[in-house]
Amino acid sequence: MRLPPIPTRLDRYIFRQLFWALVVVTLGLTALIWLTQSLRFVELVVNRGLSLVVFMRLTGLLIPSFIAVILPITTYVVIQFIYQRLAGDREVTVMRAAGLSPFSLARPALAVALVAVVSGYWLNLTVVPATLATFKEFQWEIRNKVAAFLLQEGVFTSISDKLVVYVRARSTDGSLHGILVDDARDPAVHATILAESGQLLEGARGPRVLLINGSRQEIDRQTGRLNMLTFRENEIDLANSAGPEGSRPPDMSEMGVADLLHPVRALPRDVPKWIAEAHKRLAGPLGSISYALVALVSVLTGAFQRHGGFIRPLASALTVVLLVASGLTIDGLAARDNTLIPLIWVRAALPGAVCAVLLFGPPLWSGSRPTQPGVSTGSPADPPDGTAPDGTVTA
């Protein structure tokens, strides 16, 4: 007799647990990563006077990129935990006793993994490049435009890693007094500039400072002599930009896949990195399916143990750790040598294919499949009630 549509209800029952657990775990881990990464930008609030709103907006733009990276891992964690709990509560045993196949048991997890894959592609192809482009532009504006207008009295302000400005006093009209500029942006010339007063100006390339009555001191690297030049007026560019008209150089993290595959805006030495990044974005979301199948193989195969076991979950976790580590290694190698790009796809898809064969395919060894929990292992010729073919009851 055919069973009623219990699998549909079971699908919804397991899917709800998996989906909401995935949402909660992903958001929680994202918040933790955001908290640790946002500490890098606390200095902008403490030392440069940026408001909390600007800080939240700047760091909030990084959240989609965090989700895109951790989504395959959280998918694995959720599926492994939920199915392990179902097995521990004997719910998987009851489902198998009701006649559900491994595919029927795995169907809710595969549905959740498919949601993660679609979400990963949506993030990698549209959301992450857009938010990172906004983040880079906002960060560049803060460092190269806003920072110059936040010079504080008696504080050595780092406009960039190679440009430091000190102002002894600042008048209400914006005039600066007692100015020291340490400029190491030119590798061939490291200059120290002193001026009695100055004025901040806005130029085409960003903020500039007009220095009045000062001196510029440089050390000749060949002779070791100190060269000093006095001036009445001199302008110093405070922007930290190497591009034309103050535009910042493009970063591959903010480019779309089409631009990465055809890197006309990249420097020649960065072309392999851009192409490898494109394939990484296209192959990355497939990891959700592979990791999900690794978890399912761990829980839905093998002999049932009444008191549970830790060997298979531990092996499953070590497998995922190995896959993540190999992915990082392959990404780095492919960025240097594009002939290794196929390994990115192999690493993303091959583990899932192998696990699918182990879980849903025919047994790779002689004999029957591993014993299902709660199902006796009698001879196929014997009826399930233990009655022999001649009608006598067997022990």
Image (cartoon, helix red, strand yellow):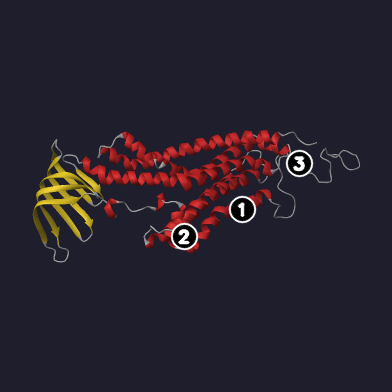
Amino acid type, residue under disc 1 in the picture:
Ala
Secondary structure, mark 3, is: loop
Secondary structure, mark 2, is: helix
Neighbour class for label 2 at 10 Å: few (<14), some, many (≥20)? Answer: many
Q: Which mark is residue 376?
A: 3
Q: Residue furthest right?
A: 390
Q: Report x, y in % for residue 197.
A: 10, 45
Q: Which of label 3 and label 1 is nearer to you?
A: 1
Seen from the viewer's position, the closer of residues 230 and 385 is 230
Neighbour class for label 1 at 10 Å: few (<14), some, many (≥20)? Answer: some
Say left or right for 273 vs 236: right
- Marks 3 and 1, the one that precedes in the sequence: 1
Amino acid type, residue under disc 3 in the picture:
Ser
In the rendered view, tell whether residue 289 sits above or below residue 392.
below
Q: Report x, y in % for residue 110.
A: 61, 43
In the rendered view, tell whether residue 150 sits above or below residue 245.
above
- Marks 3 and 2, the one that precedes in the sequence: 2
Q: Report x, y in % for residue 138.
A: 33, 43
* Residue 288 seen in the current view: yes
Tag 1 residue: 353
Say left or right for 268 vs 237: right
